[in-house]
Image (tube, helix red, strand yellow):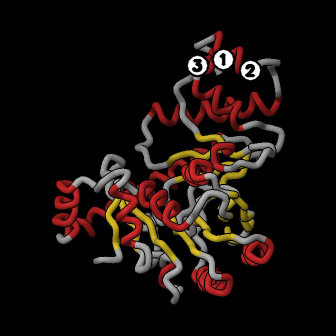
Amino acid sequence: ADDIVITSGALDALNLALQTLTQTGDYILLQDTIFYGAWQAAERLGLQVITLPTHPQYGFDLQAFEDLLKAYPIKVCWFMLNSHNPIGFTVNDKIKEKIASLLEKYQVYLIEDDTYQELYYFGQKTLPMCYFEHQNRILHCSSFSKVLGANIRIGWVRTETFSEKIQHLQLMSTLAANTLIQETLANFIATPYYDKHLQKLRKQLYQRKNLLYRLLLRYLPSSCHIHYYSSGYFLWIELPNHLNSTALFQILLSQHIGITPSHLFSIHEVPHNYIRINSSFHMDSQHKQAIISLAHAIKYLIYQRMPSLLHYFKTDSNAFRRL
């Protein structure tokens, strides 16, 4: 129990872990596409960020990982390896085992963001990185917010080596996580109802993700590629190369339709032609119409039928309905 520090959500745990392990100017390694909170944390602490490319087949590029560890004095890695946000892949156990060996070889720490650890849909629960390592170089962070609700701001970081330092930093920032919610959660997860809830939730999210995937296949142009993985609740959509996901985001936002453009997940100045879509919602007629509107907007951007599509939609609020 002394190895676990309870925090106000997973992001609090991740930030405390990073602050514990680094000083201004240190080198850290992030996946080149990753949850934007990692970029914000690195910027706030004045860290030097090196990025690891995503492997097109396995998600994690082992050779590139070792090359970067050789080339830079990297102190800490911050990775999401299970149900990756935003892409969705889960790294297999053989690769995780090799990652652990490289961390030990080069004496590098790993902060693992395992927020979606419970959202697997087949077989056994995916293993965290701390299962594969032997030198206590991994700080494992997660929370209850993805399985019990976003307002359940209870997370944790598990580390045998740095728990006292993390608690000290916590006293100077968030003080402590809500005690009443902690007590309530402790009572709930001690009952059979928590496991039943997880089973029901996984089934529901799997069905909703499959339904959204089928609708996207039906309505999106064939030039779009949907990256589908059977865990988590995000779909990562690759648009044609010449499209800008931020422009698409602005167009849809004017119609009160929410997507997440890829530039939020990367600091590289490259064409951003990906979007992330959340599949956890119930698919009603309004959401289905939003999918159809998304498809129409992409088609118009592809064929460039209007010189200023964004201006068109902003000045004519009924434009999407007429599509």
Judged from the image, the secondary structure of the residue bearing numbered disc 1 is: helix
Task: Say whether marks 2 and 3 touch (CB < 8 Å).
Answer: no
Hey, which quadrant is residue 245 in on the image?
A: top right
Residue at the spot of label 1: 313
Q: Is residue 195 left or right of residue 50?
A: left
* Residue 321 circle label: 3
Number of numbered tags placed on the structure image = 3
| Crowding at mark 2 (Cα within 10 Å: few <14, some 14-19, many 20+) | some
| Crowding at mark 3 (Cα within 10 Å: few <14, some 14-19, many 20+) | few
Residue at the spot of label 2: 309
Q: Nearer the viewer, mark 2 or mark 3?
A: 2
Amino acid under disc 3: Arg
Judged from the image, the secondary structure of the residue bearing numbered disc 2 is: helix
Where's residue 104, x and y in %?
Answer: 62, 85
Q: Residue at x 22, y 67 (%)?
A: 189
Hey, which quadrant is residue 80 in on the image?
A: bottom right
Q: Earlier in the sequence, mark 3 or mark 1?
A: 1
CA separation in Å, label 3 and label 1: 11 Å
Q: Residue at x 65, y 26 (%)?
A: 251
* Residue 143 circle label: none
